[in-house]
Amino acid sequence: MNIKVLVPTGALGITYCKKALDRGLKEKPDIIVVDGGSTDSGPAYLGKGKSKYSRSSTKSEWKTLMVAREKLKIPLLIGSAGTCGTDKTVDWFLEITKELAKELNQNIKITLLKCSQSKKNINKAFLNKNLSPLNNAPKISSKKIINCTNIVGLAGVEQITEAINTKADIIICGRSTDASLIASLPIMKGVDEAIAWHAGKIGECGAFCTTNPRSGVILISFQKNGFFIKPVSNNTKVTPYTVSAHMVYENSNPFTLIEPGGHLDVKNAIYEKQKDGSVYVTGANWVKDNNYKIKLEGTYVEGYQSISIVLIRDETYVTSIKKWSKQVENKVKKIVESSLSLKKKNYKIQFRFVGKNATLGSLERKTVEPNEIGVLVVVTAKKQYECEEISKILNPLLLHHSLFKKTELPTFSFPLSPPSFNIGKKYAFCLNHVISVKNPMDIFKLEKYSI
């Protein structure tokens, strides 16, 4: 047994080395697998049902992979297509694929794995107590579920296997677990589940498990009792440390990986350096779950946002920026209460000091004072109109508010005109739950196309 999976990059849209890809193709892989997205960038993409990555870069990188697939006549698989993996973004990705097939004069079969969920059905599962919260999951209600803009279920090996079994040339999957993309074909071909899932986790982000994460392309070769993983780029290496360390990546427990149908236990895993530069991995264990569960992700609109930006260089104000912003905030709240009749609980004003602590806020421990500070003010309210009004109330204060009662008014710098911008709808995650199903395909569906 020797099943080979080629992973060109950690996510389609962030580029990969085409020369390395060509070298990987010479290894004659059985499938090309690539991830299309995640929730790393927050809830907005799932909320809107849109891709994080540009259409042009996505199309360009996908074109190269479609050419590679045609050359070897092997399946090409993408998961979480269009970043968030909704039916809408899967269809968006299908259109790109159709365009490329026409441009490349390719006759291909395509299978879509759709993962979007009916709000009505998910609410029914909630009322029937068939939803279970994961750690730190937000509280949910029927009202919140019905108001979701999008809900997706995360496909695992069983669902992706169904798609591969259609013998399609290209499989475009909706929201999928990262590891399942790599694990599916090997498990289909008889590779032990523990070995396949472990390889899936290690290889999910491409060259992130190597000494040079930017190099992109890796090759995973499956044997009866373990798997080999190696980079394809000439200036990249893997070591037992870089490979084993990826179990920590985006994982709360470095020894356990929870997936649909069970969990992976790698406490007894062994990582061995090989003469050809690869690392050979054995010793993982797969623990089957008798209650098959699918993770759900859902988003809803919790309000609207506007932002304002002002630049401050005056040393007195830079060193007293917290005091200054608090004075501005208090003045604005008084005006908002009197003119808009808004209660404090119905809106929020947040100051972030770029150059000082905009990233960590109160957790920042460095005390070096910058020469200047960019003040980013985020206004959140129930209506966009309210955000705009509050931002306009902020405007003169951000430009001229003085710390002192008996001095001339200062003038700060607006880098843009207008200095405030409507962000639009503010999305939030409201589902971090699992749903129990009798059949793994119960809440998923396949669609087939011939081009």
Image: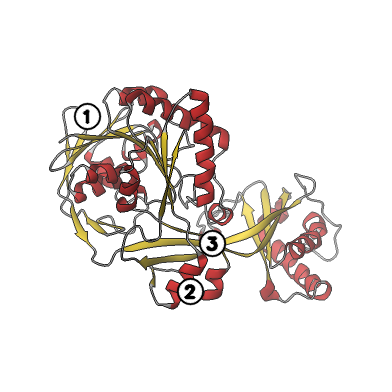
**Residue 383 visible in the picture:** yes
Label 3 crowding class (10 Å Cα cut-off): few <14, some 14-19, many 20+? many
Structural distance between the alpha carbons of marks 2 and 1: 48 Å
Q: Please, what secondary structure does the residue beneath circle 2 have?
A: loop
Quarter of the image where one finds residue 54 = top right
Percent from the top left, x then y, of residue 265? 21, 56
Question: Which of label 2 and label 3 is nearer to you?
Answer: 3
**Disc 1 residue type?**
Gly
Question: Which of label 1 and label 3 is nearer to you?
Answer: 3
Structural distance between the alpha carbons of marks 2 and 3: 13 Å
**Disc 2 residue type?**
Lys
- Which residue position holds label 2? 139
Percent from the top left, x then y, of residue 369? 60, 51
Label 1 crowding class (10 Å Cα cut-off): few <14, some 14-19, many 20+? some
Sequence-wise, the earlier of marks 2 and 1 is 2
| 31 over 368 or under it: above or below | above
On residue 299, the disc is 3
